Image (cartoon, rainbow, N blue to C red):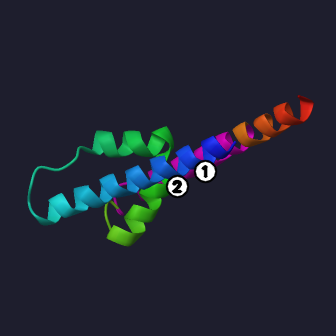
Amino acid sequence: MKTFIILFIIFNLITFIIFGIDKLLARMNRKRISEKILISFAIAGGSVGAVFAQKIFRHKTQKFRYLFWVILIVQFVIFEIIWNFSAIMSYIN
């Protein structure tokens, strides 16, 4: 279970950093990270990092506002199911 939490935190930090890099590239008028990659990281488990990056960097706030909140809620439910299932399995064993 600790591994799951550590991986969750690391993946969200990576997503947060990727959004920050994209914002920096946008300010420098350089080639940006594609929206497909940004959304993929959010869907794959980095939605918390994506939402925090949106708020802190003020990045992709108009285009993805509702999409990221939906992804965040779905991931919360999935992680809650995984968390409870692993707790039940450890209790049984």
Q: Is residue 6 above or below residue 24?
A: above
Is residue 80 within the magenta segment?
yes
Amino acid bearing label 2 = Trp
Which residue is tagged 1? 73
Name the main secondary structure of what is drawn in magenta: helix
Task: Find numbered disc 1 in the image and state the secondary structure of the residue it sits on.
Answer: helix
Please report the residue visible at 31 percent of the width from the left and 52 percent of the height from the top.
Answer: 18
- Taking 13 as reference, is 74 left or right? right
Q: Residue 52 has which mark?
A: none
Visible residue check, residue 83: yes
Please tell me which residue is depicted at 83% across the width and 31% down the height of the picture: 89
Q: Residue at x 62, y 42 (%)?
A: 4
Dot 2 falls on a residue whose secondary structure is helix
- The residue closer to the viewer here, 36 or 86, is 86
The percent position of residue 47, horizontal first and vertical second, equals 49, 51
**Disc 1 packing (10 Å; few <14; some 14–19; many ≥20):** few
Circle count: 2
Mark 1 residue type: Ile
Q: Tell whether label 2 touches label 1 (CB within 8 Å).
A: yes
Magenta-drawn segment: 61-81
Task: From the top left corner, tell me how far across and down residue 70 is, in percent.
Answer: 54, 50
Q: Mark 2 highlights which residue?
A: 69
User: Residue 8, how many percent across, how many down?
Assistant: 55, 47
* Residue 70 visible in image: no
